[in-house]
Image (cartoon, rainbow, N blue to C red):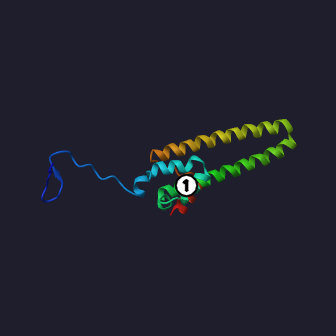
Amino acid sequence: MEGKFCGSCGSAIGGAPASPAAPSGAAASEMQDNVAGALAYLLGFITGIIFLVLEPYNRNRVVRFHAFQSIFFSAGMFVVNIALMIVGAVLGTVIPVLGAALVGVLSLIVWLGSVVLWLVLMIKTYGRSKIVLPVIGPMAEKQAG
């Protein structure tokens, strides 16, 4: 069967429409910025570091920002938890039962707050909104370039 083609552009005339060319190589396997940015928060500093190392995401300013903010957020929560453990140890010796109870409640509040913030960061990033956290957000923007 012989097809007819346009003399100026070379496209097929009549018959089945030509299918668009599928993307090839790395471009076909890249995920969108919002998905990569949201995944940078998934496992905290681990996925943050992964997205800073993986090509082509380590060259994407948006993904780099979310990766750095994820790393800084995870490090900040680690420091806060260590501080709460120290305060708990000190209060536990000064006021044995009440000190431990206060630090336990405070630890629960901090944990719940960090989980909610972590979820909000992932959801908003997936929705293409950018949340710049106080203190660590500007540091992440500076590192992202």
Left/right placement of residue 96 relative to residue 35 reads: right
What residue appears at the point 54 percent right and 46 percent down from the top-left corner? 121
Q: Residues within 10 Å of mark 1 (few under 14, many from 20)?
A: many
Judging depth in this view, the residue of 108 and 46 nearest the camera is 46
What residue appears at the point 47 percent right and 56 percent down from the top-left corner? 62
Residue 27 to residue 99: above or below: below
- Direction bottom: furthest residue: 145
Left/right placement of residue 100 relative to residue 121 reads: right
- Give how far across and how far down residue 24 sits, in percent: 37, 56
Secondary structure of residue under mark 1: helix
- Give how far across and how far down residue 27 sits, in percent: 40, 56
What residue appears at the point 35 percent right and 54 percent down from the top-left corner? 23
Left/right placement of residue 7 relative to residue 135 reads: left
- Give how far across and how far down residue 94 sits, in percent: 87, 43
Judging depth in this view, the residue of 35 and 136 nearest the camera is 35
Under mark 1, the amino acid is: Ala
The residue that disc 1 covers is: 67
- Give how far across and how far down residue 12 sits, in percent: 17, 51
What residue appears at the point 66 percent right and 49 percent down from the top-left corner? 77
Judging depth in this view, the residue of 68 and 40 nearest the camera is 40
Judging depth in this view, the residue of 23 and 56 nearest the camera is 23
